Image: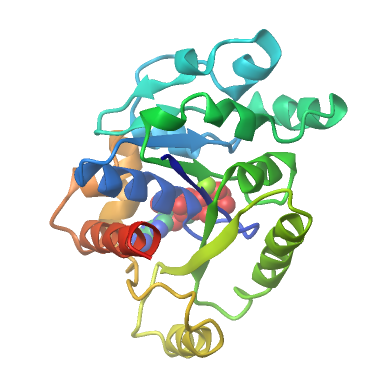
Amino acid sequence: MNKVIAIANQKGGVGKTTTAVNLASSLAATKRKVLLIDLDPQGNATTATGIKEEKPNTLYDLFFNNTPINECIYNTSDNYKVLPGDQNLIALDVGIRENNKQNFLSTELKKIDDEFDYTIIDTPPTLNQLTIEALFAASGTLIPLQCEYYSLEGVAGLMQTIQTLSDKNLTSNRVLGIIRTMVDMRNNLAKEVSDELEKHFSNLVFNTLIPRNIKLAEAPSHGVSGVKYMPTSYGAKAYLALAGELIRKVEYA
Ligand SMILES: Nc1ncnc2c1ncn2[C@@H]1O[C@H](COP(=O)(O)OP(=O)(O)OP(=O)(O)O)[C@@H](O)[C@H]1O
Ligand SMILES: [Mg+2]
């Protein structure tokens, strides 16, 4: 069965897209069939996949032009597939609300349930209808977090939203874990925040730390994940380890 996982945090620039792309690549490296969905109008994940189509079909085409979902899925330069996103998704956000089509993504994903082992959804830095669609469609959410002073603000809100949707039986989504990103343990504050996280969310914090690593930041300009771009880099190794930890959590729990 396809395990649908949303990557969410309404704070910007915390490593959502980097995590989505490199996790997709790492899971694909374990021979699992992976789909990456870009639900962010910024389209950063789409750029990072290196797809060649100039104007690929997105969920906008699926929603407004009835393009079948299979015609919105593309091969990447890596071993996973992508359902791209671009700025048209801003109109999709409005379209879903105005047409009262909440949950449409979840319905669409059921059509391709047996084609993938994992579907990873990258979301925008806001709790808008697109993010809510991802939270509805997913069975689990991963929260990337930078160990900074304000980083925990907002996370409580996101967790509450997921809990509320789940309490109302609107979704079976649960928080799978918090991922510490761009970690630099030479920084005392980062270490303090990281320790606090372990204390307060001990069962939710992933053991794998994603280090700050330039190779992860360079990779998108080459149209590949960091894992493919430089497999021996600390960043790539960390995401491969994270995928292992995730697999143990969702497949062997
Ligand atoms: N571990 C890392 N090491 C070094 N640079 C990183 C790392 N993770 C992310 N970055 C860089 O930090 C910036 C923000 O990362 P990213 O785009 O993944 O965050 P995001 O949460 O998706 O942002 P947004 O909220 O805008 O969607 C990017 O330039 C990215 O290349
Ligand atoms: Mg992003």
Residue 18 pos. (x, y %): 41, 51
State whether residue 27 appears in this view.
yes
In terms of image quadrants, where is residue 64?
Answer: top right
Answer with left or right where residue 110 lies relative to residue 136. Answer: left
Answer with left or right where residue 10 lies relative to residue 38. Answer: right
State whether residue 56 appears in this view.
no
Where the C terminus falls, by quadrant?
A: bottom left
Which of the two residues, 209 or 70, is positioned nearer the viewer here? 70
Residue at position x 40%, y 72% from top?
206
Residue at position x 65%, y 28% from top?
89
Residue at position x 60%, y 54% from top?
173
Answer with left or right where residue 246 lies relative to residue 132. Answer: left
Which of the two residues, 34 or 38, is positioned nearer the viewer here? 34
Answer with left or right where residue 211 lies relative to residue 138. Answer: left
Residue 213 pos. (x, y %): 29, 62
In terms of image quadrants, where is residue 80?
Answer: top left
Residue 252 pos. (x, y %): 33, 62
Which of the two residues, 221 or 82, is positioned nearer the viewer here? 82
Residue 218, placed above or below residue 109: below
In terms of image quadrants, where is residue 184?
Answer: bottom left
Residue 44, placed above or below residue 215: above
Residue 144 pos. (x, y %): 49, 63
Residue 144, placed above or below residue 130: below
